[in-house]
Image (spheres, grey):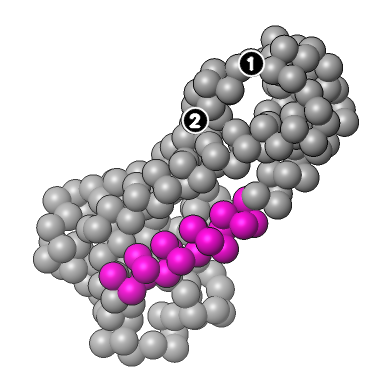
């Protein structure tokens, strides 16, 4: 998107080439986010991964429970297990594949839930990994990103009355595309992403 504002050759792309560019850009961002998901989760949430060699008490119970549930779910490579400091009751599972995943819980959920309750939460999170939800959501996000990028270009051209061979544009076109991308992204989230994500949550339950 930014490139198209500074390189006239890109602004003059035909719609078929523009769609190809949007697909590469849209899926590229989604796939990069997936591949970096574990690293970003550890960094942003402050997750401390449990070392199996030194785990004891609640940490050891958590580690053993996750590994047992993962084995039952058909996950052959055991997930990393971590805890982040927070009073909130929360847990998540992320990673590029079911055999390369991270299961993390907040310190608050460890303190406020019984083992039986927490085991149910962990089973739900591991279901996401076993069902391939991270990869599926990445593909859906890639499709959405691609169409948002493509139609933001098309609508900007139409609104500014630019033809395919027009070498104009500049900051006016760039800013209009940014606004259109925000609007289209919000619409796509409400219509596609949120309902699909909720359906995957029900399936994990």
Residue 134 position (above or below residue 123): above
- Residue 18, position as x, y percentages in the image: 58, 23
Camera-side mark, 2 or 1: 1
Q: Residue at x 16, y 67 (%)?
A: 68
Residue 13: image tag = 1
Residue 39 position (above or below residue 63): above
Local crowd size for mark 2, using a 10 Å CA cut-off: few (<14), some (14–19), many (≥20): many
Disc 1 is placed on an element classified as: loop
Q: Left or right: where does residue 30 sit relative to residue 157?
A: left
Q: Residue at x 48, y 47 (%)?
A: 141
- Residue 60, position as x, y percentages in the image: 27, 70
| Dot placed on the residue nearer the N-terminal end, 2 or 1 | 1
- Residue 52, position as x, y percentages in the image: 27, 58
Q: Residue at x 83, y 22 (%)?
A: 169
Magenta highlight range:
185-203
**Secondary structure mostly seen in the magenta stretch:** helix
Disc 2 is placed on an element classified as: helix
Local crowd size for mark 1, using a 10 Å CA cut-off: few (<14), some (14–19), many (≥20): some
Residue 1 position (above or below residue 67): above
Q: Nearer the viewer, residue 115 or 188?
A: 188
Q: Nearer the viewer, residue 188 or 99?
A: 188
Q: Residue at x 63, y 51 (%)?
A: 185
Q: Give the residue pinned by disc 2.
A: 23
Query: Among all residues in the image, which is located at the extreme right?
Result: 172
Quadrant that contains the N terminus: top right
């Amino acid at each position: 998107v930014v490139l198209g504002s500074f390189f006239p050759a890109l602004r003059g792309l035909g719609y078929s080439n523009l769609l190809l560019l949007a697909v590469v850009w849209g899926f590229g961002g989604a796939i990069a986010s997936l591949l970096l998901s574990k690293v970003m989760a550890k960094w942003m949430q402050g997750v401390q991964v449990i070392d199996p060699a030194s785990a004891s008490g609640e940490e050891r119970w958590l580690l053993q429970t996750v590994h047992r549930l993962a084995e039952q779910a058909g996950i052959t490579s055991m997930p990393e297990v971590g805890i982040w400091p927070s009073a909130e009751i929360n847990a998540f599972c992320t990673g590029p594949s079911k055999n390369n995943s991270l299961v993390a819980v907040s310190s608050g959920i460890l303190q406020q839930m019984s083992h039986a309750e927490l085991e149910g939460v962990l089973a739900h999170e591991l279901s996401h990994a076993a069902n391939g939800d991270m990869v599926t959501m990445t593909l859906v996000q890639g499709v959405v990103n691609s169409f948002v990028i493509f139609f933001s270009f098309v609508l900007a051209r139409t609104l500014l009355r630019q033809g395919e061979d027009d070498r104009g544009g500049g900051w006016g076109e760039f800013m209009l595309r940014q606004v259109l991308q925000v609007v289209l992204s919000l619409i796509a989230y409400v219509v596609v992403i949120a309902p699909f994500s909720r359906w995957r949550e029900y399936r994990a339950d």
